[in-house]
Image: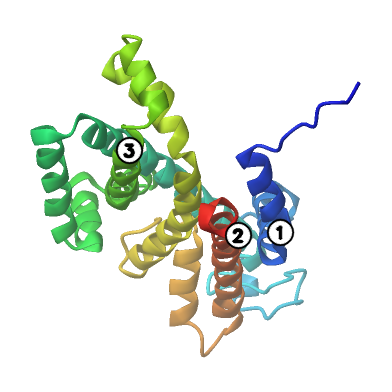
């Protein structure tokens, strides 16, 4: 008796294609190491990220037990860099989750319901698109105050616009598929159809966009830090470290070099992963 040959699902095929992409795999490995270092690194450094030592001001790397040197207050750069990496990754992740929740719900409802509801919802998105992104975030932070939780919410609250458009377009293509028509004929409500059948089939483009949103959020926070509206001292993020390093680059260039390298490597990892996911999931590349 012949043994049945088990077929490969689309997700299995996408995973196989993803792991054949050397740049994407390298990005995942390096990003995993960065996340691990950000989580456990600060507890392994013998100095606190906010520990001031006036005797070690602007100490060069590999001096006085400071592997990456110190800043103008004698604070260990390695400790601050690890904490800054943790904060930046957290901002990117949390703000992206906020944008996903809003964008997926908004786009799926607009695309599935259609008609006047779709028109009104997407015109609202167009109005928000007309406002400069950074201006809107700054307005929220100036109005409600500057703290790290607000940064999460403020950036995430305006990053959902593109996601809503992507989800709406995918929903318009899915809502007339046979499995959706069958669910409608079975008597499922619109909410149930959106939650059980529309949203799960949007995961492909959503996952790809997530890998592009996280670095965009990290860059947005870095820009806010240059304006003094990002993470507030003594807490650090990659943006605040780069901003501070740019001010002291002539006296202590290491304060700019190491945070900048960390930022570039982190963003490149996300971009490599995003490109790999896009190539793996895109049906035209199968």
Left or right for 112, reference 3: left
According to the picture, the residue beneath numbered tag 2 turns out to be: 276
Residue 186 sits in quarter: top left
The Cα–Cα distance between marks 1 and 2, rounded to whole angstroms, is 8 Å
Q: Secondary structure at mark 3?
A: helix
> Looking at the rendered structure, which numbered label has been put on residue 25?
1
In this picture, is 232 found above or below 257? above
Q: Which residue appears at 20% of the width and 53% of the height? A: 142
Residue 243 sits in quarter: bottom left
Pick whichever, 282 or 257, lies toward us: 282
According to the picture, the residue beneath numbered tag 3 turns out to be: 171
Q: Are marks 1 and 2 in contact (CB under 8 Å)?
A: yes
Residue 178 sits in quarter: top left
Residue 16 position, x and y percent, is: 71, 49
How crowded is the residue under tag 1: few (<14 C-alpha within 10 Å), some, or many (20+)? some
The Cα–Cα distance between marks 1 and 3, rounded to whole angstroms, is 30 Å
């Amino acid at each position: 008796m012949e043994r049945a040959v088990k077929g490969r699902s689309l997700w299995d095929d996408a995973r196989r294609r993803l792991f054949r992409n050397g740049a994407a795999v390298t990005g995942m490995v390096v990003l995993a190491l960065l996340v691990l270092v950000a989580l456990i690194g600060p507890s392994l450094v013998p100095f606190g990220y906010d520990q001031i030592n006036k005797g070690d001001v602007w100490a060069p790397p590999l001096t006085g037990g400071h592997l990456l040197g110190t800043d103008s207050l004698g604070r260990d750069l390695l400790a601050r860099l690890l904490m800054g990496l943790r904060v930046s990754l957290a901002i990117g992740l949390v703000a992206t989750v906020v944008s996903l929740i809003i964008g997926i719900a908004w786009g799926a409802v607009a695309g599935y319901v259609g008609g006047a509801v779709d028109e009104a919802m997407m015109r609202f998105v167009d109005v928000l698109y007309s406002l400069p992104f950074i201006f809107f975030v700054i307005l929220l932070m100036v109005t409600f105050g500057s703290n790290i939780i607000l940064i999460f919410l403020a950036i995430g609250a305006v990053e959902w616009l593109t996601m809503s458009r992507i989800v709406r377009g995918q929903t318009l293509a899915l809502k007339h598929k046979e499995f959706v028509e069958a669910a409608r004929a079975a008597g499922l409500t619109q909410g149930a159809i959106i939650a059980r059948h529309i949203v799960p089939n949007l995961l492909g483009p959503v996952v790809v966009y997530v890998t592009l949103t996280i670095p965009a959020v990290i860059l947005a926070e870095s820009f806010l830090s240059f304006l003094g509206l990002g993470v507030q001292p003594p807490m650090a993020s990659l943006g605040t470290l780069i901003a501070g390093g740019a001010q002291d680059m002539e006296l202590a260039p290491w304060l700019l070099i190491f945070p900048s390298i960390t930022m570039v490597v982190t963003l490149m990892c996300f971009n490599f992963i995003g490109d790999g996911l896009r190539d793996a999931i895109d049906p035209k590349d199968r």
